[in-house]
Image: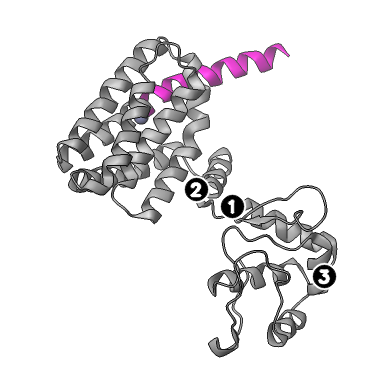
Amino acid sequence: MPGSRSLPPLSQLRCEPASPIPSLVTSQSERQRVKEKEPTYTALLESIEHRLRHGQLRVGDRLPGERSLAEEYGISRASVREALRVLSAVGLIRSGVGSGPKAGAVVVSEPSDALGWALRMHIATRTLPVADIVSTRVLLEGEAAARAADVAHQPEHVASLATARSYLEEMDHADISDDRFHFCDTRFHYEISSLGGNIVMDTVIDSLHLATVGYVQEAVPYLNDWEATKRELQDQHRAIYAAVIAGDAERAQRTVAEHIRWFYALSEIGAAHYEYHQKVRDTQV
Ligand SMILES: [Zn+2]
């Protein structure tokens, strides 16, 4: 991300209505600050970060259209598009469609998707081994499960536990699709992990899960008996849920760790079969 910069004094910062925002550059000092910098897409990124930090831009606000941004910052529309692509890739905006006042991108905050996507790409380069992603997940998710067990008895967690239970029950349906099973599996883990209340930990856990879900989905069709595997996974999910409900932190941590390691070991076998079949297919083309 962009480097250091000198910020205007707090007294110069104005709080503005959250939505819609007619202009990103409002103060003379900010306009000057941006113009003095190299007129590339980084100026726009820095300004948006600055305004987010100071509450002048918030989740749900709509950015001005491409043309307005280019005029305000004195940069080309290509540079504006570059900045918007970066913001989209880091999960900070969702692109608008069409033209007119409602066409600008909307500010969002989806760090898990962005981190998960980045991790997945770096796994693909083999810089980040899947095994290391999985052991990091074991550490963090085990800790989150222990925290969940500590607080599960508190009334404010009734809804999250009920949601986790509904995903657990849905995974028992005989006609559930593989995609839906993986979705419910992810959400079940998320609901349990989030009970602990550490949002950064939840975000990292969620992104680690998202980073490896494609790898698991590729491997699953090559497992010998997916139906038997699902039954075993469900037994493990029920054990995790029971430990959390019982307030047994040590058991919650252990059952989560065993579950993640067990399924990863199985996915490794599936992945080896998948790679073998890919190689066979490639040599036949
Ligand atoms: Zn699971």
Query: Are the residues at dot 1 and dot 3 in contact (C-beta closer than 8 Å)?
Result: no
**Snapshot quadrant of residue 258:** top left
The reply to whether the magenta stretch includes residue 63 is no
Identify whether 232 is placed above or below 147.
above
In primary-sequence order, the first of circles 1 and 3 is 3
What residue do we see at 35% from left, 28% from top?
A: 166
**Nearest the camera: 78 or 199?**
199
The residue carrying mark 1 is 91
Residue type highlighted by circle 2: Ser
**Circle 3 residues within 10 Å: few <14, some 14–19, many ≥20:** some
Return the x and y of residue 2 as percentages of the image width and height: 63, 70
In primary-sequence order, the first of circles 1 and 2 is 1
Identify whether 164 is placed above or below 171.
below
C-alpha separation, residue under disc 1 versus residue under disc 3: 23 Å
**Snapshot quadrant of residue 145:** top left
Return the x and y of residue 42 as percentages of the image width and height: 70, 68
Is residue 25 rendered to the left or right of residue 254?
A: right
What residue do we see at 17% from left, 43% from top?
A: 249
- The stretch in magenta equals 264-285
Helix, strand or loop for disc 2 = helix
Q: Which color scheme does this rendered protein use?
A: one colour
In primary-sequence order, the first of circles 2 and 3 is 3
The residue carrying mark 2 is 112
What residue do we see at 38% from left, 40% from top?
A: 190
C-alpha separation, residue under disc 2 versus residue under disc 3: 31 Å
**Circle 1 residues within 10 Å: few <14, some 14–19, many ≥20:** some
Q: Which of the numbered marks, if any, corresponds to residue 75?
A: 3
Helix, strand or loop for disc 1 = loop
